[in-house]
Amino acid sequence: MKQYDLIVVGTGGANIVVDAAQKKSLKIAQIEKGKFGGTCLTRGCIPTKVMVTAANAIQEIEEFKHIGVHTSEPTLDWDFMSKRVWHMINESNDIYEYYNAFPNIDVYRGAATFVSDKVMKVHMNDGTESEEITAPIIVLGTGGHSNIPNVPGLKDAGYLSSESLFGDKYPKKPYKSLAILGAGPIGSEFAHVFDSAGTNVTIIQRNVRLVPKEDADASEHLLKNYKARGINVLLNQTTEEVRLENGEKVVVTKDRTTGEITETRVEEILIATGIKPSVEELHLENTNIEQHPGGWIKTNEFLETSVDGIYAMGDVNGEPAFRHRANYEADIIAHNLFYAETPEDYRWARYDVLPMVTFSYPEIGHVGLTEEEAIKAGYNVGTGKNYYSSTAKGFAMGITPDSINNGFIKIVVDKDTNNILGVHVTGPQASILFQPYVNLMNSGETALKAINEDIGSARTKELRAKGLIRQMDPHSVITIGETMSPHPSLSELAMWTQVFYENRW
Ligand SMILES: Cc1cc2nc3c(=O)[nH]c(=O)nc-3n(C[C@H](O)[C@H](O)[C@H](O)COP(=O)(O)OP(=O)(O)OC[C@H]3O[C@@H](n4cnc5c(N)ncnc54)[C@H](O)[C@@H]3O)c2cc1C
C-alpha cells in the first residue's frame, strides 16, 4: 500500500490545502476525476460571470438614456463572449500541469473510493485501478452536482444542466426560447444572461418567490424587474410532465394553489433546481463517516468528519454553496494542520458572516439574517432601508424614486443592543456594497461555538473545553485575510491585498 502524508480528493477549494502542504514538502496524493479547478472555474462562478458581465453591459446600456447618453441598440456577440468563457474554462489544463510538475505530489486522474476509513483507491479515468493508498490526513473536497428532478418525460425530451451547458451541450448561438426550472441564484443568473442574449426566457419556480433565500423585499424587486424586461415568471408551480411535440419541448406545470395547468413551449430546458453532494463514488459506506439526510458529509467547526483525520470542506458538507466559503474552510484546515502551534492559534468556522450574492440584474447580496429569520429567532427587530435614489450618486446614475431599478440597502438590527443582524442590498454593484458590514460583523471577539458537537477529535474536545475566544482586531490585516468576500466580485481586489502583504515576509 502506498503511504502519503496527505490525500486530497477534489481540486476546487481543496487545492488551498495542497498548496500549504506542498510548501511544507509533504508527500501528497491529489485526486481529481474531472476538470482541474473544480466547479467554480470549469462550470460555475467564473464562466457564468463572464456571461453575466456581458449581460450587465447590455442592461446598463439600455439605462444610459436616463443620463442623456444615446447609442444604437446593443447586441450580445455570442461567439466573442463564448471564446472568453472557454478561455477561462481551459485554464483548467494549466492547473493540472502546475500540480503535476511537483515531485512530492502524485496526481491521480480518476475517482477516489474508500476501501476503509483511511484507505483509498482510485478508479483511473483510463480504465485502470490504482494500488491502495493511505495517509493519516484525508481532505474531501468533492463538491456537488445538479440535482435533476424526477419529472415524467424530462429524460426523454432532454435537458441542460450547468454541467452539460459548460460541456458538450454548449450552444453555438442563444436559444430561441428557454425554460429554466428553479429560480435560486443559478436559475436567476441564467435567466438574466439568456434574456440579454435575446432568448425568450420562462422561469418555472416551485416557491412563491424568486431567490427565496434572500430578503423578501429583494426578491420582490427582482421579480418586478424581470417582469418589466419581459421574462415570463411562473411562481408556485409543480412541474407535472415534459413532452416533445413538433420539435418543441412542452413543459406542463400546475399552480400549487389553484391547480391551474400551464403549458410552456420552448426550444430547450435548463435545470437549476439545486445541487446534491458528490459522494456517490466515495463509497462512504466503507467508512465511519457520518452523513446528513441527502448525503451531505457531517462536519464540525474544524471541518472534521466523524473519522479522526478525515476532513470535508466546500459543497460536499452542505453549508451554502459558494466558492469563497469553500476557500475559507480550506484555509482553516490548512492553518490548523500546518501552522497552529498553541491552542490560541487554532481557527474555527462560523457561517453567520458568510456573504452571499446572486449575480442577477439587479444584483442581490446579503450577509446575516433576513428580517423574517431575525423575528423567528426572537430578536427585538428593527429595520432601516435606504434607496439608491436618495443618494447623490444614485441621482447621478439616473435612478429616481419611481425608477424600476431603484434598488435599496436594508439593515436588520437587534433593537435591544443595536447590533447588526443582517444587511441586504439589491441594485447596481450590490456584491461590493455590503462588504464593510461583512468586515464589521467578522471583527471583535469570536467565541468558539461548536457545530455538530457529537463530532470532535481529542484535540477538538480540548479546544472546546478551553472556551477559546479569538480576537479579530479590526485594525489588523490578518482579520481582513480571515474575512470572506463574495466570489467573484471586485471586493476581492481590496480584500486579497493581504496575500501580497504576507508574501513580503
Ligand atoms: C452555474 C453555477 C454558478 C455558480 N456561481 C457561483 C458564484 O458566482 N459565486 C460562488 O461563490 N459560487 C458559485 N457557484 C458555486 C461554486 O461553484 C461552488 O460552491 C464551489 O465551486 C464548490 O467548491 P468545492 O471546492 O466544494 O467543490 P468543487 O469545486 O465542485 O470541486 C470538487 C471536485 O471534486 C471532484 N470529485 C468529485 N468526486 C470525486 C471523486 N470521488 N474522486 C475524485 N474527484 C472527485 C469533482 O470532479 C470536482 O472537480 C456556482 C455554481 C454553479 C453550478
Image (spheres, rainbow, N blue to C red):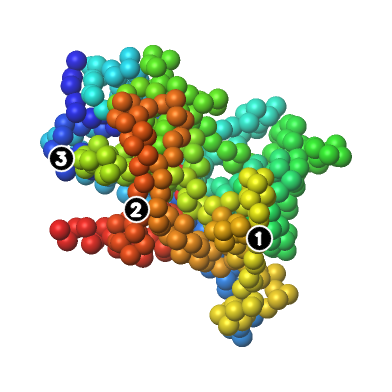
Residue type at numbered disc 3: Lys
Residue under label 2, please give it. Answer: 471
| Pick the front one: 103 or 471 | 471
Q: Position of residue 224 (x, y in %)?
A: 72, 61
Q: Is residue 412 in view from this perspective?
A: no
Q: Where is residue 380 in the image (x, y as percent from the top left)?
A: 66, 54
Quadrant containing ligand 1: top left
Q: Where is residue 342 in the image (x, y as percent from the top left)?
A: 22, 41
Residue under label 3, please give it. Answer: 24
Task: Please report the residue visible at 44 percent of the width from the left and 25 percent of the height from the top.
Answer: 454
Counting residues from the N terminus, which is met first, the one under dot 2 or under dot 3?
Answer: 3
Q: Of helix, strand and loop, which one carries label 2?
A: strand
- Is residue 448 shown above or below 8? below
- Is residue 488 shown above or below 103? below
Q: Of helix, strand and loop, which one carries label 1?
A: strand
| Pick the front one: 278 or 61 | 278
Q: Do the residues labelled 2 and 3 touch (CB within 8 Å)?
A: no
Task: Please report the residue visible at 25 percent of the width from the left and 37 percent of the height from the top.
Answer: 337
Calculate the distance from the C-alpha at mark 3 to the C-alpha at mark 1. 50 Å
| Pick the front one: 85 or 391 | 391
Calculate the distance from the C-alpha at mark 1 to the C-alpha at mark 2. 28 Å
In the image, which disc is placed on residue 505?
none
Q: Do the residues labelled 3 and 1 touch (CB within 8 Å)?
A: no
Residue under label 1, please give it. Answer: 382
- Is residue 20 shown above or below 77? above
Image position of 160 (left or right of 101): right
Q: Is mark 3 within 8 Å of ligand 1?
A: no
Q: Could you tell me which quadrant the C terminus lies in?
A: bottom left
In the rendered image, the residue lying farthest to the bottom is 68
